[in-house]
Image (cartoon, helix red, strand yellow):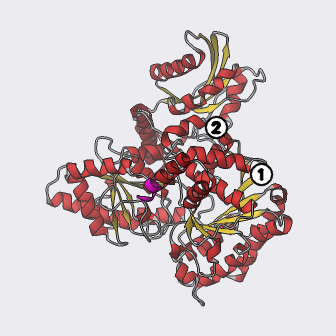
Amino acid sequence: MVTKFSSHIEKINPDVLNQVNSLSIPTQIFAALRVNHETLDIAEISRENAFEYKNERLVKHIQEGVISYLKNEAKRRNIKYIAVELRGHLQLRGLISKLWFEGDIVPYVPQRDDGTHVTEVVQRLTANFNERNIVYVQVEPTNEINVSELCDLEDYVGVTGGNDLELAAHLAREFKGKKLTFINATPQGGGVALMRHALIRYYKLLGVDAHWYILTPDSDVFVVTKSKFHNMLQAVSPVGTELTQEEMDLYDRWILENAQKLEKVFQDSDVIVIDDPQPCGLIPHIKSVNPKAKIIYRSHIQIVGSLASTENTPQRKTWSFLWERIKGADLFVSHPIKDFIPTDVPKEKIVYMPATTDPLDGLNKPLTETQMAFYLKLFNQVLIVQEGQKPLDLHRPYIVQIARFDPSKGIPDVIEAYLVLCEMLKKYEHKQVPQLIIAGNASIDDPDGVPIYNATMELLRSEKYKHLAQDVKVARLPHIDQMLNTLLRKSKVVLQLSTKEGFEIKVTEGLMKAKPVIAYRTGGIPWQIEEGINGFLVESGGTTQVAGHLYDLFTNDELYRKMSESAEKFANKDYLTVPNAMCWLFLSNQLLKKHDLGGQYAWVKDLVHRYFENKTSSNLFSKLLTISHQHQSLHRKEE
């Protein structure tokens, strides 16, 4: 049997193809393996080459033998295994983590083996990936998202702070028999989707009955929700673009269609979390279908609360429309900034939670030098083929900002700061001028991406910046998390010059990788950076000051060493998946027990610790919780 796949690389012109070939990118392979006693049946497919089938003898323990075989083949043949499906033995489930962490391979291990031959298994496996070998997000006809299985509970032990694992497990037992549902607009692109993938994956490991649904996409509605909801509330929409009655009606019709599709979900759920303005119109429908359900509204964006609270402003018009739908929620969860919350939200409903990231997903897991070299080659392929730019010079350092192409991400300021830095380095005859990378993923509910990208490229072609353009790499990246991980890990300094920001998790991810971060003092970012310790905070528009900090980090080795060490040491473990999961379970349990949470801008994690301190009769356990709580509180700033 032979299968041939077409490749998008084949469609490019010969000169560009030669540049890509010079990168020597390893051939990307999909494989299916079946263990038969002491042998392996193996079927492999690449998109460029025909199918291959062979049989190998295992000479070691099953798990060691499989990993050893894959590593040796990758090195010997200059290939990269993208995904592997394992069949034939119960012990293979123990390979899920090893494949993901050691091999950087997406693991597929079914609960049972139906006997399908590996040649058929591997062909089915490739259907889960697009032509660029990026995994499709699995969306059920019900709009539920199926998340990947990548690791085990034990993998979280070394990356989680304090007693969070124990507390999360206890809260999961309390929640047993109940169903928790999350609803947002998109399955991929942006921080909310990333958090939900990690959260649902962890809940499955804990045995929590948690589910994640998305709204049926509508491009016309997403123009409204981005420009008239998101951008308007952040006060970055152009003057004269306030929400119209026609747009309100369009949104309400779309919400009704989604509410009808999700009606069974509403009926079956005990607690429902509504993420951001896009799905907030569902709240009255949930109340109508299931009055007993507890509803939590989670605001992830930087609302300019003062404008949203002032009559006769376009922000107030948008907020009033949304608040009419949100006000039925039992709780209002916000990033820990009081100014993000309009005044008509009752204080007793308001609690704080930070945005989080997962230490074990593709964005953050450790990568070997060989693995990172592969993703840098893929990045250069994107620059050459998609963007028509020269590849990144891997022998020179670079500065990076990872963010969506969005009007609030401060991309013109990034370029201006880079210009000033280059002039400073030239003036002081510093020999090695760094490069600059501006890159980000797209999201289906974000129509700003293409216009902002085009504006960025036009800016680089202007007289002021065109002499720098060859050293500035601007890329709309495919959804390969390890590519972003690599770009952060191999960078010298991370920038985040957002002018409006809820809680930028890329700051936390940069710090976790021992990179000093320079950011604007906006939104939730000051909660993430210890000024002068692991990064620098600059007032919005201070591009000269940003350049000055960059200059110091590039010319003062001792300063850079200290800040790099501090970045990794003080990256806050409150901003990770396990405490996030713990907080959602705590809120759900308390609402279902009809306990008064008090609100009043309390951090949910503080409420969790207080709850367990009051609950336990063990002095030792209480003392451990108190010590853990005090340690984490050291990193929090007063508002």
User: Can residue 388 be seen by looking at this rendering?
Assistant: no
- Residue at image point 47% right, 30% down: 26
The front one of 357 and 164 is: 164
Give the image location of residue 145, x and y in percent: 70, 48
Q: Mark 1 points at which residue?
A: 178
Taking the magenta stretch, the answer to whether it contains residue 181 is no
Mark seen at residue 149: 2
- Residue at image point 84% right, 58% down: 267
Mark found first going from the N terminus, 1 or 2 = 2
Q: Residues within 10 Å of mark 2 (few under 14, many from 20)?
A: some
Task: Name the kind of residue labelled 1 in the image.
Answer: Lys
- The magenta region covers 630-635
The Cα–Cα distance between marks 1 and 2, rounded to whole angstroms, is 22 Å
Judge whether 29 appears above or below 190 on screen.
Answer: above
The front one of 163 and 553 is: 163
Give the image location of residue 177, x and y in percent: 79, 48
Task: Look at the numbered disc 1 and give the secondary structure of its residue.
Answer: loop
In the image, taking residue 143 as reference, residue 315 lies left or right, namely left
Q: Do the residues labelled 1 and 2 touch (CB within 8 Å)?
A: no
